[in-house]
Amino acid sequence: MVLVRKPASATEGGELTDGAQTIAGDKTFTGDIEVTGNLVAPEATAAEGKFDSITDQAGTGAPDFPNGVNLGAGLLGETLSGTISTVNLTSGPQNISSVVLTPGTWIVVGWVLMIKGGGSPTSEMFITLGVSLTSATLDDPYNIVNYHYSNGIGQPRLNSGTRVITVASNTTIYLVGVYGNITSGLTNLDVQPSSVFTATRIA
């Protein structure tokens, strides 16, 4: 970076020349300052340095988090993901995945890809998904999503609904699902490994 004072002369208060210079203490400039290059603020901590490429292009007062950027443990935008393997959903609540939240506030959501298991889907069935603080339990009736199918099923990708969770200590949360057979011949649904369960830190 080069700072040029106009006019730049010793009689007008000195000049800043090309090249690297360190200027200590407070400085007061009277007159115009021309800046070529970038003004770069020092990084006080390694954590602050993670925000170098984050901007507030939306003008909301909060940083924008680019897709695919995980800002690391303890920082806003940190993302945690649960592991999902094939799960055969039957008539009782079952864990599809889990993740351990560290202290803070998180937005948690699951997307579940299902295919039919045994039997043939001929008529009515339902699927219930939710984010839960209790293993194999849908613990909050206001944070579940019910899906009803009246004429069979293909390969739906279903949303669990979004839940905001605040924890004071490390806490395991669960993505829970239930399959219900009303008049269908389908005995179970298979949750596929391409499903996702994520938590994003917001505080």
Image (cartoon, rainbow, N blue to C red):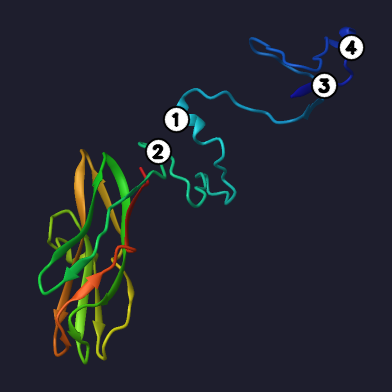
Q: Quadrant of residue 189?
A: bottom left
- Mark 4 and mark 2 lie on one chain; the one further toward the N terminus is 4
Q: Residue at x 24, y 90 (%)?
A: 150
Question: Badge 2 is on which residue?
Answer: 72
Q: Position of residue 64 (x, y in %)?
A: 52, 48
In the rendered view, does 24 fall on the left or right side of 125?
right
Amino acid type at mark 2: Gly
Amino acid type at mark 3: Val
Task: Please tell me whether residue 19 is drawn above or below residue 116 in the rendered image.
Answer: above
In the rendered view, does 175 fall on the left or right side of 136?
right
Q: Are marks 1 and 2 in contact (CB under 8 Å)?
A: yes
- Mark 4 and mark 1 lie on one chain; the one further toward the N terminus is 4
- Mark 1 and mark 3 lie on one chain; the one further toward the N terminus is 3
- Marks 4/3: CA distance? 10 Å
- Mark 3 and mark 2 lie on one chain; the one further toward the N terminus is 3
Please count the marks in the image: 4
Q: Residue at x 31, y 48 (%)?
A: 106
Question: Badge 3 is on which residue?
Answer: 4
118 or 110, which lies in front? 118
Q: Position of residue 155 (x, y in %)?
A: 33, 78
Q: In the rendering, which numbered label is found on residue 9?
A: 4
* CA neighbours of label 2 inside 10 A, class few (<14), some (14 to 19), many (20+): few
* CA neighbours of label 3 inside 10 A, class few (<14), some (14 to 19), many (20+): some
Question: Badge 1 is on which residue?
Answer: 47
